[in-house]
Each structure stands twice: as structure tokens, then as C-alpha cells.
Image (cartoon, rainbow, N blue to C red):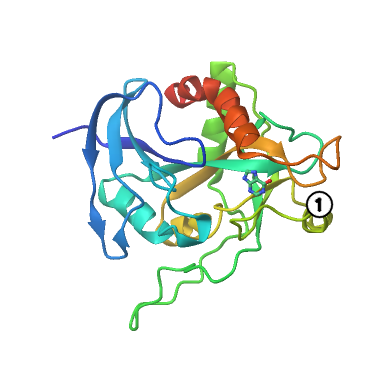
Amino acid sequence: MSDPIALAVIGGTGLYKLADLQDVRTVQPDTRFGAASGPIRIGTLGGHTVAFLARHGEGHSLPPHKINYRANLAALQSLGATRVLALNTVGGITERFGPRVLACPDQLIDYTWGRISTICEEPGTEVLHVDFGEPYTRSLREAVIDAAGRAGVALVADGCYGATQGPRLETRAEIARLRRDGCDLVGMTGMPEAGLARELGLEYACLAIVANWAAGAGPDPDEVITLQDVLDNVAAASSGLPRLLSAL
Ligand code: HPA
């Protein structure tokens, strides 16, 4: 019998493997919602058992609106995971959230549409109206913030995540609207994942990795966002992740 999973990590764009995961075995559980995005890799990190799943698939083959968020979470839960840390690559909107910043948001606004956003779809299932005033689990957020402090990894300890539909990036007008709405960060995969995690009774927090200034948000309003910049900034910002996760 292997040790229980202390933490499940879902990796976003540019994060398809978890550096420093040791003694890795791979599983691919089927769920009542279908198949997860790809194999789940279970190994040890910082002396604890950690499961890792690449949200877009290991070859980044799934766009945000095609991800089976329900299957991903249910697969991790079926392995015994109760705490999920979502790594989300995002654009930064407000001053404190420039490229390469790590942040642990405490709020979100959902602008996505047409995604299956509940586990209560099948006829006969009980309809849940889960409380979502605080969309991320406070105790897990506090643990992430504390771990970053102990690991010496700089982290902005709040922020509002705006979840957009994608896969295209936003217009400058859309980002101006998100700013007016109170969003600090923008990404495409934060929802429905967080809401589904709440319905499934999972502890869930987001660790956002700022890859770029969102459209028109940076010092150069004409800047064009390239995938290479996104990947370079994610790689640079992720260097402290194994330390943070080990501390967590
Ligand atoms: N917008 C939405 N999602 C993103 C961005 C962005 O600018 N950068 C990385 N993911």
C-alpha cells in the first residue's frame, strides 16, 4: 500500500511535468465523467506523496474549453487526493502582477461560457448549490502562502482571477473591462475547475504564474503577446516551485 496523496497538483500551460518528483509511477483512472486529460504521475516530493496531472494534456493538445475538468478532478479524488493545488498560467492586469510574479488569488470572476460547470447534470442527481463566496479553500491558501515564505519564494498573497473563454487572448477593451470589474489576473482555465472542486468537496487553491501583461495592461500598450514570451516567463517564474511545493 503506498502512502496517501498529500497533495494533487494540476499543471497549466508550460507546466507539463513536475520537476523534482521522485520514484514516479503513472496511472490513468477512468471516472464517471470520462477520461482525464492524460496520465497522472504519482511520486514523492519533500518526503510526501504528490500526484501531478497536466491540465491540457502532456502535449498541450486540449484547448481550455475542451478540457474535461470534471474527469480531471474526479480522477485525482479517486486516487485519494483531498487537496488540489491548481497551477494556472495567467496574464497580469494590475500593477502588482507583472510578468514572472507568482500569486495566490483569493477571489475570481467567471466569464467563461458553454462549459460543463457542475457535477449535477445527470437526471436524478441531487442539485447542489454550494457556497462559493470564498472560491478558494482558505486553509490551503494559507498553507501555500506560508510555504512560500518558508521556501523564500516571492508570492503575492491575494488577487482576483478573471476566467475568460479563450483560446484566443483578450482585446484591450476586454482587459480594460476586467480591470474595471476588479480583476488582477486573467486566465482561461480557472473555471469551472474551482467550482467543480467545491462541489466535489475537494480543498482547492490556485497558484497563478504571470506569463505576460494582459492586452494593453503593461507599460507598452502596443505590445504583442507571443507564445515564446509566455513559455519563457513561465519557465523563469517556476524555478522556485519545487522548493515551494516541498515546503507545502
Ligand atoms: N490572457 C488569458 N490567459 C492567459 C494570458 C492572457 O493574457 N496569458 C496566459 N494565459
As drawn, 139 above or below 21: below
Which image quadrant: the N terminus? top left
Residue 32: x and y in percent read 27, 65
Check the image and name the residue furthest to the bottom.
Answer: 123
Q: Residues within 10 Å of mark 1 (few under 14, many from 20)?
A: some
Q: Residue at x 65, y 32 (%)?
A: 229
Q: Is residue 103 visible?
A: no
Q: Residue at x 41, y 73 (%)?
A: 120
Describe the element under mark 1 as helix, strand or loop: helix
Check the image and name the residue furthest to the left.
Answer: 1
As drawn, 155 above or below 243: below
Residue 38: x and y in percent read 32, 47
Q: Residue at x 23, y 57 (%)?
A: 30
Residue assigned mark 1: 179
Q: Residue at x 59, y 69 (%)?
A: 113
As drawn, 222 above or below 176: above
Left or right of 152? Residue 124 is left
Rendering quarter of residue 141: top right
Q: Is residue 142 visible?
A: yes
Task: Pick the residue in front: 225 or 97.
Answer: 225
Task: Pick the residue in front: 130 or 19.
Answer: 19
Left or right of 159? Residue 53 is left
Rendering quarter of residue 138: top right
Residue 106: x and y in percent read 64, 46
Residue 28: x and y in percent read 24, 48
| Amino acid at circle 1 | Arg
Left or right of 14? Residue 112 is right
Left or right of 31? Residue 104 is right
